[in-house]
Image (spheres, rainbow, N blue to C red):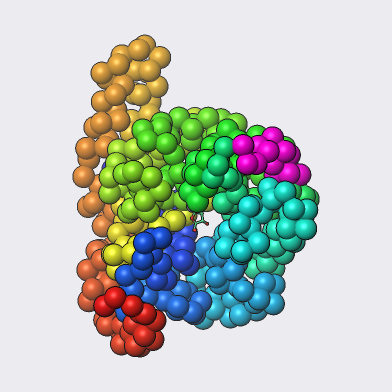
Amino acid sequence: MSHEQIAAAALDQLAIELPSWGFANTGTRFGKFLQAAAATTLEEKFADAAQVHALTGACPTLALHVLWDLPGGVADVARVQALEARHGVRAGSINPNLFQGQRYKHGSVGNPDPAIRAEALAHLRESVDIARQLGSRDLSLWFADGSNYPGTQHIRQRKHWFAEALSMVHERLGPGQRMLVEYKPFEPAFYHTDIADWGMALLLAREAGPQAHVLVDTGHHYQSQNIEQIVAWLLDEQRLGGFHFNDRRYADDDLTLGSIDPYQVFRIFHEIQQFAWERGAAPDLAYMVDQSHNLKGKIEAMIQTVRTAQELWVKAALVDREALAGHQAACRLVEAERCLTDAFATDTRPLVTAWATARGLPPDPFVAFRESGYLETITRERGDRNLASVTSYA
Ligand code: PSV
Ligand code: MN
């Protein structure tokens, strides 16, 4: 197959989910720099996501956070369905929120207070129902649970509460649904986090049941951790559910995918495509962006992220797998490594552009967005309201 054919086949398979919260004004714990064009309502988030999808052709779904996007719970499902129909973007993964309520100060399903654990479980179950009614396959679970001071929480006891709660959530899942268990080593908890790494997430997923999988957020690792090895192991265990894409330099920085270490993203994609090649079928994974940009234009950052993912995905598709298998078996180290570095060094931008053009998409979605006038329109429409919420320190 030619490079063009390989690229087209690879790109046709890559759908990337956008996060509703990536279009809203968010910040750091030190402050927010508000953007006039940011989305506030769910309607605006759907409209912005639809722009990214129209220009990239790769983002048919929008991840929703229950508390932020469906504060009324299942009662809001009809409103979401109307937005899906209006904007041509479907609701994607459903993210329960168990980290902002004051009652969750000492945890949600790991809280020592049984009444709070029960409340958390009720929210999780309602989130399963929301997902089912929307036809969203994945319930995406991240827990901020943990503790800040040694000795203040019973780590093993909390592990049991987690196992119990996740099993109960699993029982609620319909046949086509999945639950994805996301891990993160620290923040907001600074001493221990209940689901701190992929091993803990895997054990809990296994205990919960066959529809539970692990979610790898690329920003949620210790410095220099070998993420592609984690991916390879989870694939092999048939428990990799999907990704939250972002990049990091220090901690969970929410930087643009590939902006710090594109070779790592390439190596992750390589492991996935290697697995697919050996099995003769692509693994069923959810590729989701989890980035909230405080400084970059939000829609532009999403377009940039999607394009970067596509370019790196195609680079991984260009690895000569037949040759690599032979070099690995014979321990021809330089030759094997060159299969990766040659593919990584290939300029895939023209291949992505050719794919886009063939599908009637703009050759450069970033330029098309700049020329569309959409940003000026939403800045005009949303600016006064957004900037009115600046309260201090101009
Ligand atoms: C937590 O840092 C996280 O990665 C989880 O996926 C949340 O759902 C998301 O960020 C937004 O807060
Ligand atoms: Mn995440």
Does residue 218 belong to the magenta stretch?
Answer: no
> Looking at the image, is 271 positioned above or below residue 173?
above
Q: Please state, as top left, top right, bottom left or bottom right, where the C terminus lies in the image.
A: bottom left
Coordinates of residue 192 in the picture (x, y in percent)? 55, 40
- In terms of image quadrants, where is residue 127? bottom right
Magenta stretch: helix, strand or loop mostly: helix
- Name the foreground residue: 206 vs 320: 206
Write down the quadrant of residue 167 in the picture.
top right
Residue closest to the eye, 312 or 141: 141
Residue 386 visible to the viewer: no
Residue 63 x, y percent position in the rendering: 52, 63
Horizontally, residue 63 falls left or right of residue 212, namely left
Depicted 112 relative to depicted 393: above or below: above
Q: Which quarter of the image is occupied by the N terminus?
A: top left
- On screen, 332 above or below 294? above
Give the residue at x 47% y 59%. 17
Residue 41: x percent and y percent? 49, 79
Q: Looking at the image, can residue 200 be seen?
A: yes
Q: Is residue 125 left or right of residue 280?
A: right
In the image, residue 162 lies in the stretch drawn in magenta: yes
Q: How many marks?
A: 0
Q: Residue at x 34, y 82 (%)?
A: 387
Give 223 or 207, whichever is nearer the viewer.
223
The residue at the point 23 percent across, 51 percent down is 349
Residue farthest to the top? 330
Q: Position of residue 139 (x, y in %)?
A: 63, 56
**Measuring 40% from the left and 14% from the top, which residue is drawn there?**
329
Left or right: 238 in relation to 309: right
Q: Which residues are magenta?
A: 151-164
For residue 181, side relative to residue 309 (left or right):
right
